Image (spheres, rainbow, N blue to C red):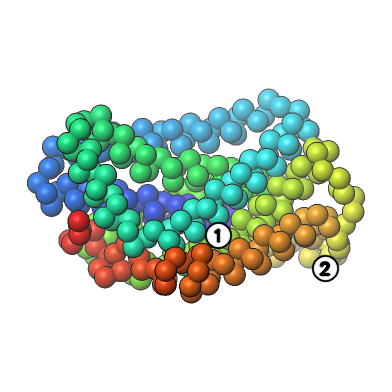
């Protein structure tokens, strides 16, 4: 549940910040007439993300077991790729996010209503689709048959919306650079578990060998149905009896990815340390800078 809460919070807060920046800029420039198309674009993006998630969930139920495992494994790997790209992208471009959005919004204002709808849709839709895919993959990996993963994701999104509202009202100031660094690092850990389980799905679908070749088995020490086993499963997608391939994939992804992401200088952070979009003042409604 916690891992899905983290996904919803991280992705939801990115979308909330985008919405805050767009709306605050329109209000400050006295273009309130453009707010309606912005909200329409946001609504369409949210509806598309929900529809995509429903299509993944209900569409996969019509498949055979092998096909379900193959689909789940493939989409899990795709979801990890998208989330990895997202956390690195946010580290590199966070300081330019506000000016970039302002530029796109200025161009859309000159082009008309349809362009405004499209700008809001594209700005929010990417986070929505990524969230739907990664939450579905995480829920599929958890496989406990309870609604807790979905509840966790929903609570994370609601928290993000509330924080976004506080940002807009100027009632909350946090160090966004540190926030996105810590949550990004935790997401990399979660993604490593999802990736390992995705490869396990492909083994169960008979796409990859080694299903019976276990790296270790500590089920007696950490029973999967114990409270701590359930906690580890829910947070890290931990499995007490992983295959050799799962452990190998987990290590090959987690160690270099986390090292690159946390590096103060280099690929993870561009030229020097990245500042948050509003690190100088995390209140989009009060001081948006063009």
> Which-is-in-front pick, marks 1 and 2?
1
The answer to whether 102 appears left or right of 222 in the picture is left
Q: Residues within 10 Å of mark 2 (few under 14, many from 20)?
A: few
Contact (Cβ within 8 Å) of mark 1 with mark 2: no
The answer to whether 261 appears left or right of 102 in the picture is right
| 266 shown above or below 38 | below
Residue 145 appears in the figure: no
In space, the residues marked 1 and 2 are separated at their CA atoms by 27 Å
Which of the numbered marks, if any, corresponds to residue 119?
none
Which of the numbered marks, if any, corresponds to residue 187?
1
Q: Position of residue 170 (x, y in %)?
A: 22, 63
Residues 66 and 90: in front is: 90
Residues 223 and 70: in front is: 70
The answer to whether 286 appears left or right of 156 in the picture is left
SS for tag 2? loop
Q: Residue at x 24, y 48 (%)?
A: 103
Q: Position of residue 24 (x, y in %)?
A: 20, 52
Q: Residue at x 41, y 51 (%)?
A: 12
Q: Position of residue 252 (x, y in %)?
A: 71, 61
Q: Residues within 10 Å of mark 1 (few under 14, many from 20)?
A: many
Labels 1 and 2: the sequence-earlier one: 1
Residue linked to disc 2: 221
Residue that lies at the very extreme toward the bottom in this rendered image: 264
Say which quadrant the N terminus sits in.
bottom right
Q: Residue at x 45, y 52 (%)?
A: 11
Residue that lies at the very extreme toward the left in this rendered image: 30
Residues 229 and 57: in front is: 57
Say which quadrant the C terminus sits in.
bottom left
Q: Tell me where residue 258 sits by quadrant.
A: bottom right
SS for tag 1? helix
């Amino acid at each position: 549940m916690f891992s899905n809460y983290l996904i919803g919070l991280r992705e939801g807060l990115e979308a909330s910040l985008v919405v805050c920046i767009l709306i605050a800029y329109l209000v400050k420039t006295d273009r309130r007439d453009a707010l309606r198309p912005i909200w329409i674009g946001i609504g369409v993006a949210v509806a598309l993300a929900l529809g995509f998630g429903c299509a993944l969930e209900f569409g996969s139920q019509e498949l055979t077991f092998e096909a379900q495992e193959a689909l789940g494994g493939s989409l899990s790997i795709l979801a990890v790729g998208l989330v990895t790209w997202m956390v690195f992208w946010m580290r590199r471009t966070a300081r330019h996010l506000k000016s970039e959005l302002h530029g796109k919004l200025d161009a859309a204002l000159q082009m008309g209503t349809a362009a405004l709808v499209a700008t809001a849709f594209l700005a929010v839709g990417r986070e929505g689709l990524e969230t739907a895919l990664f939450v579905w993959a995480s829920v599929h990996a958890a496989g406990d048959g309870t609604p807790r993963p979905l509840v966790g994701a929903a609570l994370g999104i609601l928290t993000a919306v509330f924080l976004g509202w506080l940002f807009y009202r100027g009632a909350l100031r946090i160090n966004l650079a540190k926030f996105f660094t810590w949550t990004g690092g935790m997401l990399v850990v979660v993604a490593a578990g999802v990736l390992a389980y995705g490869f396990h799905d492909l083994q169960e679908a008979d796409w990859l060998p080694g299903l019976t070749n276990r790296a270790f088995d500590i089920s007696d020490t950490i029973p999967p149905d114990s409270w701590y086993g359930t906690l580890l499963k829910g947070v890290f997608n931990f499995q007490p009896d992983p295959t050799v391939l799962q452990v190998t994939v987990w290590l090959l992804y987690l160690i270099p990815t986390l090292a690159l992401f946390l590096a103060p200088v280099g690929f993870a952070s561009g030229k020097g340390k990245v500042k948050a979009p509003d690190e100088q003042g995390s209140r989009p409604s009060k001081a948006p800078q063009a």
